[in-house]
Amino acid sequence: MEPEEQIYVNLEELGDYRTEYHRPEETETKPVRTDAVAGEETETWPPFKVTTVCLGLLCLLLLTTVIGLGAVYDRDFKQLSRDLANHTAEKDQLLVRYQNLTDERDQLQTIHELNNKLGTCPHGWRQFGCSCYYLYTRKSTWANSRQTCLSQGADLVIIDSQEEMVFLNKLGARLKFWIGLSQSSTHRYLSTWAWANGRSFVTSYWQNDRLSYDYYGGGQCCAAFNSFNSNWRIKSWSSEVCSQVLQWVCEKQAQMSFLS
C-alpha cells in the first residue's frame, strides 16, 4: 500500500473513531418541543393588549379615587354648610342683641335727657310730666288749702288731661280732695267756673251730666276730686261748699336739673 493511501485510510479511521467516541454531553438528546408548548408560546399577549389592561386598571383606580374624593368633598361641604348656617344664625342673634342694646341705650339717653328737661321734685312729692304733686292727708277749707299750696310755691292742682286724672286717681284709695276749680262768685246764675290761675276749663269730669250750679245759702262752690273705677268714661268732680273741709293736692313745676 502506498503511503498516501495509507494516510487516507488512517484519516478515515480517525473520522470513524471520532464519530463513535464523543463527549457525553454531546450524546444527550435535546428535548424536543411538543406542539402544545409551542402553541403556548405562540399565544403570548401582544404588548398593546398589556398596555390596554394597565390603562384600564389605572382608569378604574382613578375613578375609585375620584368617587372617594367626591364623597369626602360632599361630606365636608355639608359640614361647612351647617357651620355657615350656625354662624349666620349666631350673627343674626348678635345683631338683634346689639340692636336691642342700642335701643335700650337710646331709651336711657332719652330718659336722662327728659329728666334733665322735666326736672326733679322735692322729697315726698310725686312727679307726673313736668309737674310735682303732693297730697295733704289732713283736711281744710278750699281757701286755706290753696293758701298752704301757695306757701310751698305751688297751687291747688289744675287738671289738663285724662292722663292726669288717672295719675291723681292712683294717689290713694277712696280719695276726695280739693282741686283748683271754683265758681267765680256766689251768684247762682251769673257765676262761672274757672281754675285758680284764672284759666277757663275746657274738659270736665263732673259726676253729673250737667254742670252743677248748686247754691248753698249764698256760699261759694268749689270742685272736689273723687276716686273713680273706670278709666274709660271718668266721672269724678263734685261741687262742694268751699267752706267744707277736705284733703287737697298741691301742684308745682318740677325743678330744672342742669346736670349732664
Image (cartoon, rainbow, N blue to C red):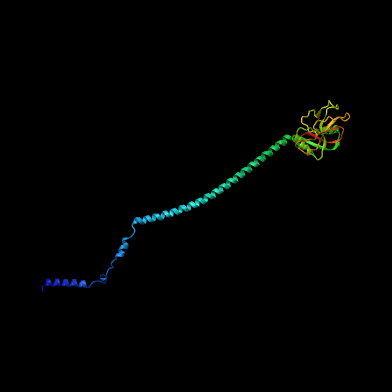
Q: Most extreme residue toward the front, as rendered?
A: 209
Numbered label tally: 0
Quarter residue 244 falls in: top right
Farthest-out residue, right: 217
- Residue at 63% over, 41% down: 99
Residue 154 visible somewhere in the drawing: no
Tell me: 234 left or right of 71. right
Query: Quick one: 124 or 230, which is closer to the camera?
Result: 230
* 129 w.r.t. 5: above or below: above
Q: Position of residue 224 (x, y in %)?
A: 82, 34
> In the depicted view, which residue is nearer to us: 240 or 132?
240
Residue 181 location in percent, x, y? 81, 31
Q: Residue at x 12, y 71 (%)?
A: 5
Which of the image's four quarters has the C terminus? top right
Q: Position of residue 196 (x, y in %)?
A: 81, 30
**Residue 21's quadrant in the figure?**
bottom left
- Could you say which quadrant of the image residue 100 lies in? top right
User: As drawn, which residue projects farthest toward the top?
Assistant: 190
257 shown above or below 27: above
Q: Nearer the viewer, residue 9 or 144?
A: 144
- Which image quarter is the N terminus in? bottom left
The residue furthest left is 2
Can you see residue 76?
A: yes
Counting from the top left corner in percent of width and height, residue 67 is at 47, 53
